[in-house]
Image (cartoon, rainbow, N blue to C red):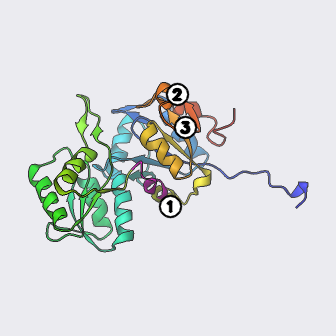
Amino acid sequence: MNADDTPTDTPAWNYLMDMDGVLVHENSLVPGADRFLDELRAERIPFMVLTNNSIRTPRDLRARLLRTGLDVPEESIWTSALATATFLASQRPGGSAYVVGESGLTTALHDIGYVLTDTDPDYVVLGETRTYSFEAITTAIRLVERGARFIATNPDPTGPSLDGSLPATGSVAALITRATGRDPYFVGKPNALMMRSALRAIGAHSEHTLMIGDRMDTDIVCGLEAGLQTVLVLTGISSRESVELYPYRPTRVVESVADLVGRTTRPFDD
């Protein structure tokens, strides 16, 4: 190949991005997030919005985002529930599960053909819920003791609310582990499995994909381990100072996704 034959075009970027702390904060739009998504659509850039929360279905989350002013199609939303269902479908097609969780998780498992049962299930699957019950947790413990495999959608110990922290999947998983001596397999971030399943869902390759997140300990490390370039935004959990506490670094730190508007096709050009 001579100089005249050298390709000048570089492959377009694909985008994975966390939802809470990146596009929305509580129930409010992060300023500039709407312009950022509009530019991705205008440039025909594939993207997927990720969330470790397994409570809501993509349809529910789309409605939530619409209320903030963000128009994200259902097929562009990837939850830890969907990642968990995809994983279970690959491991044990047509299996059964006892589920502690809400509609986002039960719907995802029904959609892959799983039977939900409390009688000799293949798996106990723990997800996020605002109505954890002593009875359901006790049933989960007994089923794990009897040999059911233990899966959890994500390891987050707490979740946010207007009144403060709420116990989340990781905390309840720790309770079941303490009672049974069995650790769950966590599918959601920071497991790179969630990133890889999202990449497959949009037909993207890690080499040309960028992960945007607000947490060093989930979004950024997960992106790194999946082979993605990473951007940390400061509109959520992490600060510039907290970056220095970790042995790894994001590719770039920006104030918010608004800083990427006008440069989605060249995010790392100075």
Of marks 1 and 3, which one's residue comes earlier in the chain? 1
Distance, label 1 to label 3, CA atoms, is 25 Å
Q: Amino acid at mark 3?
A: Arg
In front of the other: 27 or 154: 154
Mark 1 crowdedness (10 Å alpha carbons): few <14, some 14-19, many ≥20: few
The percent position of residue 101, horizontal first and vertical second, equals: 22, 53
Mark 1 touches mark 3? (CB < 8 Å): no
Residue 174: give x, y in percent of width and height.
Answer: 23, 48
Q: Does label 2 or label 3 sit earlier along the sequence?
A: 3
| Residue 203, quarter of the rendered image | bottom right
Residue at image mark 1: 200
Q: Nearer the viewer, mark 2 or mark 3?
A: 3
Residues in magenta, as a range? 189-196
Residue 249's tag is 3
Residue pointed to by mark 2: 255
Residue reaching furthest front?
Answer: 181
The type of residue carrying mark 1 is Arg
- Can residue 31 be seen in the rendering of this structure? yes
Inter-mark Cα distance, 2 to 1: 29 Å
